[in-house]
């Protein structure tokens, strides 16, 4: 059964064509409109309530001017100083023609706050003085205002401006903290990528080097061993390229997704299920490695599995570089109810054996990376030589 999609545009589709969601049809937002209506209502209620108490008549011109005075607030975000100036002119006209009992309206307060948020100090000071002067105007320009009116006008204006300055200062501190957190997150991500690159290079490249040396040594004696070593070398190189590509995907995550770039979904990160393969690769490289598991590792979170995998990977690579490929290594994984513990122990260079570590080793980045990984999970790491011979790495992570 073939279903045909209707070609008649729906009401929502027509609306999106006429008014796209990403195009600002109006120069103000819904919040600006609500604020304007609220300020107008507050001023109108105050203007009509006070005459009922004092017995003074309500002026229709005053109601009109109050309503018109609130309309410029729609543009307060784009033109705060202009809006403040217009409201001051309308306020002065209102006080000269239809004086109000309340001297500081909501529209004037919102306009002064917006101008103080966006204007420079000298402009804010001039508008503040102008606000105080306008609120004290009377139909008889020479009619004095009481001390209470003058004091309250000055305090109100200073309170609004002070609030605007405080909000500006708070936003600046918030933005600085946000940038600091963003920079810290970027630095942490760089350290994580550096750890991953170090683990990939230290393990994969070292294994490939040992396999290539073994294949060269047996090239004239045992072609079967050479063929097997080359096959394993090819697989190890492919895995190294895949892991490094995943790290590059992280660096280019803002450009596109990994699936769009490579045409296939990104391969999962290694975990505890890959420890057997890791041990097998070490054996093929000539390292006598054994793996022992106590408990059920299937219930561990993937991030914990990745951390344990990288620790074992780095410890095996260090054993090959510093003790030699022929030194036996024991890997033991213990899954307890509240913790998971992994230990990697090598027997050290045998007595009488001569082994020179590879040049450029011993930088300590491997141990630093392992400590950082364990610290992220709130665990502990102990690494050091054994009393008799050998080296041991023990990591314990809480669950």
Image: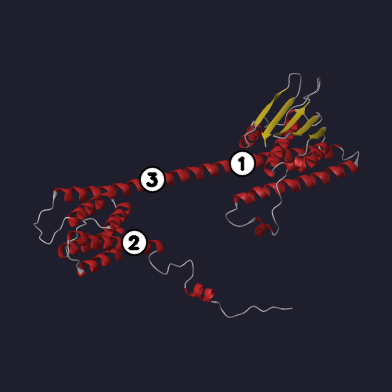
Q: Residue at x 67, y 43 (%)?
A: 303
Distance from Cα at disc 3 to Cα at disc 2: 26 Å
Nearest to the eye among marks 1 and 3: give it.
3
| Quadrant of the frame with the N terminus | bottom right
The residue sitting at the bottom extreme is 8
Specify whether 368 is left or right of 59. right
Residue 190 appears in view: yes
Q: Residue at x 19, y 67 (%)?
A: 59
Q: Identify the mark nearer the N-term, 3 or 2.
A: 2
Instruction: List the residue tagged with mark 1.
Output: 192
Distance from Cα at disc 1 to Cα at disc 3: 33 Å
| SS assignment at label 1 | helix
- In the drawing, what numbered circle is on residue 390? none
The spot of residue 262 in percent (x, y) is 68, 57
The spot of residue 177 in percent (x, y) is 45, 43
Nearest to the eye among marks 3 and 2: give it.
2
Against 258, residue 323 (above or below) is: above
Query: Badge 2, how many Cα within 10 Å: few under 14, some, many 20+?
Result: some
Residue 202 appears in view: no
Nearest to the eye among marks 1 and 2: give it.
2
Against 78, residue 240 (above or below) is: above
Query: Badge 3, how many Cα within 10 Å: few under 14, some, many 20+?
Result: few
The spot of residue 320 in percent (x, y) is 76, 32
Find out whether the residues at labels 1 and 3 contact each other: C-beta distance under 8 Å.
Answer: no
Find out whether the residues at labels 3 and 2 contact each other: C-beta distance under 8 Å.
Answer: no
Specify whether 20 is left or right of 252. left
Colour mode of the rendering:
secondary structure
Q: Residue at x 10, y 59 (%)?
A: 141
Instruction: List the residue tagged with mark 3.
Output: 170
């Amino acid at each position: 059964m073939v279903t045909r999609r209707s070609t008649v545009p729906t009401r929502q589709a027509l609306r999106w064509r006429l008014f796209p969601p990403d195009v600002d049809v109006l120069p103000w937002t819904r919040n600006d409109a609500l604020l304007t209506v609220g300020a107008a209502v507050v001023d109108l209620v105050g203007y009509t309530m006070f005459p009922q108490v004092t017995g003074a008549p309500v002026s229709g011109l005053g109601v009109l001017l109050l309503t018109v005075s609130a309309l410029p607030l729609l543009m307060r975000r784009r033109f705060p100083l202009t809006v403040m100036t217009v409201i001051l002119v309308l306020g002065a006209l209102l006080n000269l023609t239809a004086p109000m009992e309340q001297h500081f309206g909501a529209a004037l307060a919102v306009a002064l706050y917006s101008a103080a948020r966006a204007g420079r100090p000298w402009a804010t000071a001039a508008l503040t003085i102008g606000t105080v002067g306008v609120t004290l105007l009377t139909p008889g320009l020479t009619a004095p205002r009481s001390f209470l009116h003058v004091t309250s006008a000055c305090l109100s204006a200073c309170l609004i401006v002070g609030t605007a300055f405080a909000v500006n200062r708070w936003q600046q501190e918030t933005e600085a903290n946000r940038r600091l957190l963003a920079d810290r997150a970027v630095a942490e991500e760089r350290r994580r990528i550096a750890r991953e690159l170090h683990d990939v290079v230290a393990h994969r490249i070292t294994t490939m080097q040992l396999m290539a040396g073994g294949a060269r040594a047996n090239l004239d004696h045992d072609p079967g061993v050479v063929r097997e070593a080359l096959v394993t070398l090819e697989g190890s190189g492919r895995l190294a390229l895949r892991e490094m590509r995943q790290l590059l995907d992280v660096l280019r995550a803002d450009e596109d997704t990994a699936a769009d770039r490579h045409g296939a979904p990104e391969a999962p990160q290694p975990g505890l299920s890959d420890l057997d393969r890791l041990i097998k690769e070490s054996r093929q490289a000539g390292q006598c490695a054994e793996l022992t598991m106590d408990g059920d590792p299937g219930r561990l979170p993937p991030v914990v599995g990745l951390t344990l995998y990288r620790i074992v990977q780095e410890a095996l690579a260090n054993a090959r570089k510093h003790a030699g490929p022929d030194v036996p290594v024991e890997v033991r994984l213990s899954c307890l109810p509240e913790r998971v513990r992994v230990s990697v122990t090598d027997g050290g260079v045998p007595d009488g054996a001569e082994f020179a570590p590879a040049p450029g080793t011993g930088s300590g980045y491997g141990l630093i990376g392992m400590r950082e990984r364990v610290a992220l999970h709130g665990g502990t790491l102990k690494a050091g030589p054994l009393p008799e011979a050998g080296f041991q790495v023990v990591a314990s992570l809480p669950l």
